[in-house]
Amino acid sequence: EVQVLESGGGLVQPGGSLRLSCAASGFTFSTSPMNWVRQAPGKGLEWVSTISSGGPTYYADSVKGRFTISRDNSKNTLWLQMNGLRAEDTAVYYCAKGRMNGPFGDFDYWGQGTLVTVSS
Amino acid sequence: QSALTQPASVSGSPGQSITISCTGTRSDVGSYNLVSWYQQHPGKAPKLIIYEATQRPSGVSSRFSGSKSGNTASLTISGLQAEDEADYYCSSYAKSDTVLFGGGTKLTVL
């Protein structure tokens, strides 16, 4: 059974940093593109970042230069390092497996999400 | 880039069919068949129901179908059921290697 499980969310002050983790199982992680998608409270979905199986990374303009996506295929783990956090980054962050190797928006398995709150 | 445009809400009675539109531009929906649709029930994670504009993942009901014409993609749900009441989002690959989502459509089953 495919499972993705996010962790690392919490309350952080503006300008602070947070590192989200996503543990994956039930599929061949090393050959799968992985993604982060977020959803602000009561709002719609927003793509954040994609990392292809071979390592190329892609970011939304809203987080470019502040967030870094990375993966460790030996640990079946995905991360999102978030620096310079702003109030508008407050959201549930979902880890999602992609179908095709690139930022194509086809996310076939999702975790339950982890809440990040940026507030003083 | 701007988000894709979806109607804020649609409604239908059980057994009827409804269609949700998703309008983009020549830089996204109009140039690629990389449109996906997601169903999200309250408090739950989104679920992929259509990919590559018209393809259904294994296990998704055949009552869900997708199409695309020009800059607009559409999701049709036939034989509407109470359990279909949810939020629906479209997404598309966009030029410069980004992903755009629509603002979401709330489906009410009357």
Image: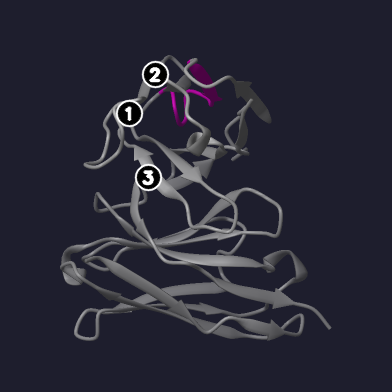
Spatial distance from mark 1 to mark 3, Cα to Cα? 16 Å
Q: Which sits in the foreground, B72 or B43? A: B43
Q: Secondary structure at mark 3?
A: strand
Spatial distance from mark 3 to mark 2, Cα to Cα? 17 Å
Mark 1 and 2 residues: CB-CB less than 8 Å, in contact?
yes
Which residue position is annotated with label 2? B68
Q: Is residue B76 above or below residue A37?
A: above
Give coordinates of residue B28: x percent, y percent: 45, 31
Q: Is residue B10 above or below residue B50?
A: above
Q: Secondary structure at mark 2?
A: strand
Which residue position is annotated with label 3? B48
Q: Is residue B24 above or below residue A27?
A: above
Disc 3: host chain = B
Comes first in the chain, label 3 or label 2: 3
The three-letter amino acid code for the residue at tag 1 is Asn
Magenta extent: B17-30
The three-letter amino acid code for the residue at tag 2 is Lys
Disc 1: host chain = B
Disc 2: host chain = B
Q: Which mark is residue A35?
A: none
Q: Secondary structure at mark 1?
A: loop
**Disc 3: CA contacts within 10 A as few (<14), some (14-19) or many (>=20):** many
- Which residue is at a point 52% across and 39% down the rendered structure image? B89
Nearest-to-viewer mark from 1 and 3: 3
